[in-house]
Image (cartoon, rainbow, N blue to C red):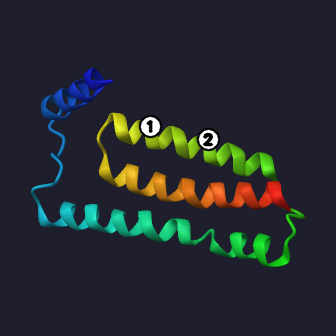
Amino acid sequence: MHGFHHLRERARVTQGLEPFPARSFKLRAIDRLMYGVGFLAPLALLPQISQIYSTKSSEGVSLLTWVLLTCAGILWTIYGAVHKDKHLLFASGFMIIFHMTIVIGLIIY
């Protein structure tokens, strides 16, 4: 796994990609914005979580969809860990927590 990170860094240098954290103010601002997105995007799932747990019903909500989204989130988290990408780790890890909360609610109810 460590080798992939090295290849990515080498590609970043040879292709003239921006280092992380970015040197320019604009790109650092975008980096910070993405932390905000990583925090706020999972909050969009709160109405679904609230509906499942408050009504104690999972009617009309697909278990398969949420299991697949959880699996995809786990893969993104692994990818972020391999590439040492803090933004991706933060966002996908936070999203997994919410997806699993929904899956558990669907299994219970």
- Could you say which quadrant of the image residue 23 lies in? bottom left
Left or right, 90 with reference to 67: left
The residue lying at 29 percent from left, 41 percent from top is: 84
Residue 16: x, y in percent?
14, 37
Q: Residue at x 18, y 66 (%)?
A: 26
| Residue 102 place in picture, x, y as percent | 70, 60
Residue 71: image tag? 2
The relative height of residue 81 versus residue 50 in the rendered view (above or below) is above
Q: How far apart are marks 1 and 2 (CA)?
A: 11 Å
Q: Residue at x 35, y 34 (%)?
A: 82
**Residue lying furthest top in this view?**
3
Image quadrant containing the C terminus = bottom right
Kind of residue at badge 1: Ile
Q: Earlier in the sequence, mark 1 or mark 2?
A: 2
Tags 1 and 2 touching, CB below 8 Å? no
Residue 78: assigned label: 1
The image shows a total of numbered marks equal to 2
Q: Where is residue 48 in the image (x, y as percent from the top left)?
A: 71, 70
Report the amino acid beneath label 2: Cys
